[in-house]
Amino acid sequence: MHDLEPYYNWRELYISSEDPRSPFFEREYSEFEFSDKIYNYFIHPQWDSFGSQTLFMKILYADYEEGFCVLELIGEWNDLLYNDIMILKRDIIEHLQREGIARFILIGENVLNFHSSDDCYYEEWFEEVNDEDGWIALLNFRDHVLDDFAAANIDSYFVLGGKLNELRWRALHPDQLYEQVETHVMRRLSAG
C-alpha cells in the first residue's frame, strides 16, 4: 500500500496544502518518512489523515466558483468501529461546505471495504447539499463496497454505479470530469 500515491497529475492546477480555503492548508508532507498506517500497512505520506484510523484522503481539486471538489479515498471506510463518516462530515465536508462546495466527487477505487453503522450523517450531508442544488457522486468504487452501501440502505444518498463506476477520470481535466459527472447526475435526477 505504500506505493499507492494520491493522483498527482492535477498538482499544477491545485494543491490542497497551498489553498487557504482547504482544511489541509499549510500541511507539510514528507516524501521519505512513512508514518501513517492502515492496520499494519504503511501508506504513502502524501495521503491526508483526517482523524480516521483506517480511511485517508486527498483533495485532488476544488473549484469554489463552480462549487465542486474531487476527493480521493484510500483504506477501509469503517463507520461501525471508527465512525468515519462523522469525522469526514464534521472535519472535512462541513469545512468545504462553508467555503461554498455543494457538489462532491468521491473517488473510491482504493476503498477496500465498508462497514456501516447508522445513516444519520449521510442523511444530513445529503439534505445539506440538496438545499444548495448539490450532490454527492461516487466514482470507481469496488462492486462489493457498493453492495455494502446498498445493504446498509445508504446508497440512496449518493449518485453511484453505472457509468460513474467506469469513468476514466485520470484522462480528464478536472473541469471535464465535473461536466461529465454533472451531466450524468442530472440525467439520473431527471429520470428519478
Image (spheres, rainbow, N blue to C red):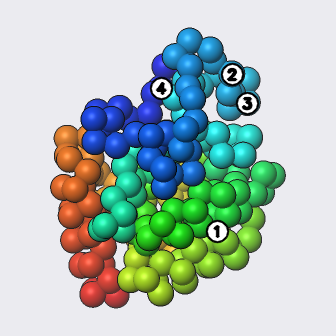
Give left or right: position of 105 versus 168: right
Which quadrant holds the C terminus?
A: bottom left
Please give the residue where the numbered disc 1 appears in the rendered image.
152
Q: Residue at x 18, y 55 (%)?
A: 176
Q: Are marks 3 and 2 in contact (CB under 8 Å)?
A: no
In the current view of this chain or complex, which residue is farthest to the right?
81
Q: Hey, what amino acid is under mark 3?
A: Tyr
- What percent of the width, then of the height, locates residue 138? 42, 59
- Between label 3 and label 1, give the one nearer the viewer: 3
Please give the residue where the numbered disc 4 appears in the rendered image.
4
Tell me the CA gap for discs 4 and 1. 28 Å
Tell me the CA gap for discs 3 and 1. 24 Å
Q: Which mark is residue 35?
A: 2
User: Which quadrant of the figure has residue 112?
Assistant: top right
Mark 4 vs mark 3: which is more N-terminal? 4
Q: Hey, what amino acid is under mark 1?
A: Ala
Tell me the CA gap for discs 2 and 1. 32 Å
